[in-house]
Image (tube, rainbow, N blue to C red):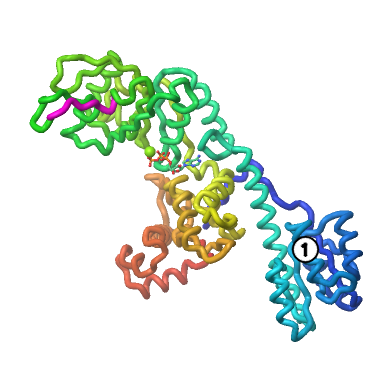
Amino acid sequence: MKTQPDLSEPQDRARTVAASLLIVDDEEATRRLCSDIAIEAGLRVRTASTTEEALEALDQYPADIVITDLKVPQLGGLELLRRLREHYPQISVLVLTQYGSISTAVEATRLGAADYLTKPFHVEELRRKLTRLIHEQELDQENRVLREQLRTRPGYGELIGLSSKMQRVYKLIEKVSQHNYPVLILGESGTGKELVARSIHFSGARRQKPFAPVDCSALVPTLIESELFGYAKGAFTGAIHTKQGLIESADGGTLFLDEIGDLPVDMQAKLLRVLQEREIRPVGSNERVSIDVRVIAATNRDLEAAVRNNGFRQDLFFRLNVVQIKLPPLRERKTDIPILVQSFLEKFADPARPAPVLAEDAMAHLTAYDWPGNVRELENAIERAVALGSGPILQSGDLPSNLQYGTPPSERAPASDEIVPLDELERRAILRALRESGGDKLVAAKLLGIGKTTLYRKLKEYQAHLPVS
Ligand SMILES: Nc1ncnc2c1ncn2[C@@H]1O[C@H](COP(=O)(O)OP(=O)(O)OP(=O)(O)O)[C@@H](O)[C@H]1O
Ligand SMILES: [Mg+2]
């Protein structure tokens, strides 16, 4: 079962009216045939029998698609195509050629025709080509809206997203950046905690001074103290120079204590002292150095629970938790997915070409998925799709295969006292294994401790419930 995208906030629907088509051909029979098929496909249709009529019609109001015969009177189809490319570059042009004149068709494609069809054509073929053009136009339209939104900076600094949950975050950033008190940023992995810390620093008065991130989870326990506080020459074997610590390097600016929940308890006491006394004493030194830093801390752990379990000092928690900013997981702001996707498509696209766009069903996969790795996971998925994708339109097959197996919410937070039917448990285990194996059934079977054929049989049994595209 796919989880539904959060539709509580309206998304921009790109097209509200039917696409419009202009048919240019001097043969009435062709005009009528094309017209019938186009109307059936839901298009608004106009016709012209000469290039002059065509240009006049477009002058009155534009079209999304033009079908033109190459032998149409006055200017001829190729010249019409040239003018359309010049004055109406957004129109997709489908060219009709005579049997045996493939070289003109090639010329038309070179001039920018979206496609061509050889007369006499099969009705089904025209229908297929028209449907494809309409679909591409819709995608293009949707992406234009997204591109336009991106240009107007839909977020705060580097942070992207317009959902109400993010708007609340921006308001808080704006407020706290004007002050100096400590901020504690909480949120799951990949929700943008570091970006928020940077935004606070770079929108405040300290922006010209250093922003010094310290990853508390990456500090080597035996070296933490000298890393943070620095050391004096001769403080220990190998200390041949005096070295400035990370805290001092942030002087005047912002000290970002990332993954603060991972700081060992004995260091927590020392850090607390620094924050209270606003001075540090480098290892092996008798001198105290006064420092002026703004402290921002972040963690993906439940710090309050850690305080209760004595894994985190309560006094340090109080000191850091003056203002708390909680970042929402991506699954709680799914309306931001399209604009994030657009920004990542542009970020990772080859700068020499227009950024690729995402097919509709690929976007549907992205909004149905629950993103346990949040924005970072989305960013990686798009980077990969851009690198491996085969053309200007990225299909769902270009996305990591685990996206095709969404995370049912029931699986994410199982109530401990809930009795789950065995077959449901089995189904969840299979989904989980498929996700972890990135869709590789052989690996999934191994994870489940069953044979591949058993997995195939079970998949068949559960097929009705599996969100496989
Ligand atoms: N709102 C956002 N808009 C644009 N990009 C974002 C946003 N949030 C996160 N990102 C991007 O996602 C990635 C992860 O963000 P960041 O490192 O800030 O997350 P984090 O919460 O610190 O994660 P972790 O807990 O794993 O350290 C970065 O590449 C960042 O640029
Ligand atoms: Mg981080």
Residue 261 percent across, percent down from the top left: 30, 32
Write the residue at 16% across / 23% down. Answer: 232
Vertical placement of residue 264 versus 175, above or below: below
User: Which quadrant would residue 283 be assigned to in this image?
Assistant: top left
Judge whether residue 244 is colored magenta. Answer: yes
Amino acid under disc 1: Ile
Observer-nearest residue: 352 or 335?
A: 352
Residue furthest left in the image: 237
- Looking at the image, which is closer to me, 87 or 454? 87
Q: Up-down: is 150 above or below 156?
A: below
Q: Which residues are magenta?
A: 240-247
Above or below 236: residue 139: below
Q: Which residue shows up at 50% across the image and 26% down it?
A: 203
In the image, farthest residue toward the bottom: 100
463 inside magenta stretch: no
Q: Position of residue 309 (x, y in %)?
A: 27, 30
Label 1, on which residue?
65
